[in-house]
Image (spheres, grey):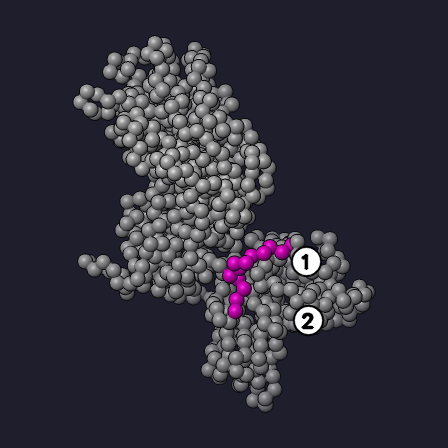
Amino acid sequence: MIEKISLSRQDLEELECLKVNPADIQDDYYDYSKIVVKKPWGYEYLIFSNAKVAVWVLYLKRDAQTSVHCHPNKKTSLVVLEGKVNCSSLAGTRARSAGEGLLIDKGVFHQTTAVSKTGAFVMEIETPINKRDLVRLKDKYGREGKGYETQDQYCFNSKNYNYISFQSNVKKHFGHCSMAFKKLVDSKSLNEILALDPEDVVCLLDGRLLNASGHSVLDIGDTVVVNEFRQLRPVQVDPNSEILIIKNTDPISKVSDIVSRLLNERNVKPIFIVPGDANVHLLDSIGRCDGLSYVCMRNEKSASFAVESFCKLRSTVGALVVSSGSSAISAVPGVANAWMDSVPMLVISGQARTDQNTKGGVRQLSDKSLSITNLVKSITKYAVEVSDPAQIGYHLDKAIYLATDGRPGPVWVDLPIDVQGMSIHEDELSKFVPEDKSSPKLKGQISQVMEMLKQASRPVILAGHGIRQAKAIGDFLALIERLKIPVLTSRRGADIIPDDHPWFFGRPGAYGQRSANFIIQNCDLLISIGSRLSIPLIGRNTKAFARAARKIVVDIDAHELQKPTLKIDLPIALDAGEFIRECLTFLPDSLPSCAAWLGRCQDWRAKFPPVLSNDSLSFVRMLSDEMNENDVIVADGGASLIYALQAFCFKSGQRLISSTGLELPGFALPAAIGACIARDSKSIVCLCEDHGFQNNLQELQTIIDYQLPIKILILKSRGHSIIRNIQRDYFGSRFVGTDHEIRLGSTSLARIAEIFGFPGATTLQELLKIKGPAVFEVQIEDDQDQIPRPGFIIREDRKWMAKPLEDMVPFLDRKTFQENMMIDVIQDEL
């Protein structure tokens, strides 16, 4: 229903009292097509305009209301697209739901209030198009007497897909309503309008509609329901007349629109995209979906790292949309690392048409066609090509569910381009309903844990990232406060507990802290929670790992409890959060004191601190001192990650994002983009080596385009330092492939960034004070001799044998080493 509100005497009297200066409401001809205007009640944006009509979409938050205002020189149609509102004039209030609206005369004072729980979307159709033609009578936000919003309230969006031209030929959904723009060229196209549902809404945007007598039946900007339109008996149209159609209930949707709507409803946003010719339907739908924003990256590899980092920081599903062929293949490195690091990442790829898919021995039919799902099945929890449009909702929801169910991991949905563009009735969509899962009974296992704690004199907890994934950090801190035993952290769990916590004693590992390795190797009870105990953590001599300890390992992935590298005394296949909460419930009032053991652990920490005389470690410690609580640092894999784990002192709330599974050398720069987006564009510190920086130069432009406050720290060395030391120690100093920078030198990388528009800094302190993006290149010595690292010996049979985790290079003298061991060490291990 569309009701007309005519100008009243009271409207005229109120407008006369305001004594409006005509100059204040003259058109300034501003181009609103690429901005969103922020309002105290929500926002609005222009979706269509021509020389005569402007169509705006307004979003009003729950209980928010526009001012009581009028437009002295233009008429306005209001149509509710989603939700419920109360529309008030000086004469009274009318409730309006989706598909209903008002046609408001020039000069009529009116106000709209959203009453739905989720707010309301309202379409406003104005003619003429002067946005400054606005007079406010009353306003709860204090804007009485003020004109239209000034430019400081404009959000500039140069990639705004919401503005539509008639060349676009699109339909846009809001809830159950849809809107579409159509050209009327002859009587056939007019009959299509007359055949619509009687309660659908039409608005003339341009041209003329004539009755049998040759008179216009509808003025430009007028809005009526189809039933009333039929009664006007239009029989003739001017060629290229333009009309807006709002369907009250539209169950027919384009598949790509369904994808974007589901992502928005499941809060999988923003979407990281890389444009390609096989994902154009998806791109268009993402751009047109209200509430669904996107980040456009330069290439798929860096985009996959950005999404992975986004997921790691938010502990939620993130999405990447790529094209087909090499575009999809380029996203594999990030997916592979997400598989190793348990990251819930969703990739949606375009694909060739379904009738061009190859079967059997034919390798390829269409250009850029490749069965990507067959390639990624081994590194995803779910990979599917959707050829039936009715199955898109099922597969997308299943993928999103599986990404976080149990041990998180990446998922992949491949969508052929012809399927993307198909339309389907909403009732035909299959739905995914996850199975109910019963929680395991743990009382017996928890009792065993408590009994083993009572018997231990040197217990240690190893805290892994699974604790964060289970959203159980608060419960974990409560547990260790009651247990009062030493806590070590894994590489991905490094930021779970601040370094100054009284029960924190370091980070063990092959490249870990020497003191932490002494602690874990001398314990008699190891409780590992949410760590996969990979070889970089337990060392290559896996039989010697915590060899005097009984081991309790809690992991949500049962496969991790059956690895040949570990001998586990009490395996518990369980979510880390559930285990911690059960322990808190059954923890006895008192446990044996560990005072002597805690004293010994403190002694190791004091004896073997990080070697800060090394350039790299001293710089990272300086960075640590300068950073504040809740800051985020993103580090490349390899040496940068080692430096951070060795020397960075984590403060409360700080996060370290890195590539721990594959230790990707070019991870940090694009990952910093994802982290910055995840933090709503708050500052990020990016710690990358020179080679990692060079791998991603094109994404410097992305940082500049989005003005992301990323502080890039380039650790400039002679490159390949870790590999060169291995070549020196075990391959006769034959530096094959690792001596380019030594022989030839390299250019200043900071100068390259400055070409893109990055301001350079001369000190670390200066870098961190710059508000926007900035770069600082620091020259470091790459001599690794002073940094603790894995120890090896080459036996007489020329086989390499790894030393136990505690016996690190540079080796301690044997007397000092034995003095720091509380367990018997056999001679072969020395």
At a point 34% along the width and 53% down the height, the residue shown is: 328
Q: Secondary structure at mark 2?
A: loop
The range drawn in magenta is 153-165
Residue 149, numbered label: 1
Mark pair 1, 2: CA separation? 18 Å
Rendered image quadrant of residue 317: top left
At a point 59% along the width and 42% down the height, the residue shown is: 771
Query: 366 and 118: which one is in front?
Result: 366
Q: Image height check: is 469 above or below 101?
A: above
Task: Say which amino acid is labelled 2.
Answer: Lys
Task: Say which amino acid is labelled 1.
Answer: Glu
Q: Image height check: is 337 above or below 498?
A: below
Residue 74, numbered label: 2
> Percent x, y for residue 134?
71, 64
> Percent x, y for residue 77?
62, 69
> Percent x, y for residue 829?
27, 17
The C terminus appears in which quarter of the rendering?
top left
Mark 2 Cα-neighbour bin, 10 Å: few <14, some 14–19, many ≥20: many
